[in-house]
Amino acid sequence: LVNATCLEEGNTALLVCEGYGRPIPNYEFLKNNRIVSDERITQNGNTLEITGIQQTDEGVYSCQSYNDVGGVTQTSPSVSDSRDLQYCSAPSVSVMSSDESNTFTEGSDAVLICIASGTAIASIVWSVA
């Protein structure tokens, strides 16, 4: 599977599973140990495409390859055949002040409050324009 960890809303994710065997293997994708089933998620051979990413797409995806001889064939990467996909959203920031009119007189104290939401918020930096 291709390593994809952060899924942004509305984007598309592609997961690719490589299996080896003779005869050529078939592939099955699982999400949280259940067969993937959603109209926005399509499988074409060894590739799983998730379109219009939503928060519900978050989870652990894995793949299995098998052929007519039976059993699971070797999957790549050989160490792990699963990826933890996390939903990420852009940060949203709003600033509030201690004065509803946002008007302060020179020399007076002002209290500004920054409220940030979203996933993976790294830091908040204040600056004066």
Image: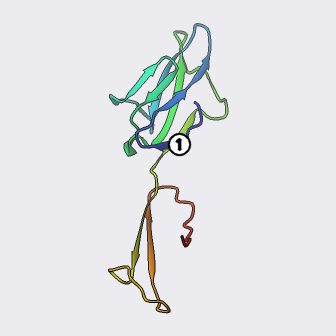
Q: What residue is shown with label 1?
A: 84
Amino acid at circle 1 = Asp
Q: Residue at point 57% right, 60% down?
A: 122
**Looking at the image, what colour scheme do you see?**
rainbow
The image shows residue 48 at horizontal and vertical percentages of: 47, 26
Q: Position of residue 46 (x, y in %)?
A: 52, 20
Compared to 28, does 31 lie above or below?
below
Left or right position of 6 against 36? right
**Residue at 53% over, 17% down:** 66
Q: Is residue 78 left or right of residue 63?
A: right
Give the residue drawn at x 32%, y 28%: 39
Q: Quadrant of the N terminus?
A: top right
Mark 1, secondary structure of its residue: strand
Horizontal side of 117 relative to 23 (left or right) equals left
Answer with the quarter of the image where residue 22 lies.
top right
Q: Residue at x 56, y 21 (%)?
A: 72
Q: Quadrant of residue 52?
A: top left
Q: Residues within 10 Å of mark 1 (few under 14, many from 20)?
A: some
Please, which residue is most extreme toward the bottom here? Answer: 107
Name the quarter where the C terminus is drawn: bottom right
- In this picture, residue 116 sits left or right of residue 3: left
Give coordinates of residue 101: x percent, y percent. Answer: 33, 80
Q: In the image, residue 21 lies at what x, y percent?
A: 62, 13
- Front residue of 69 and 95: 95
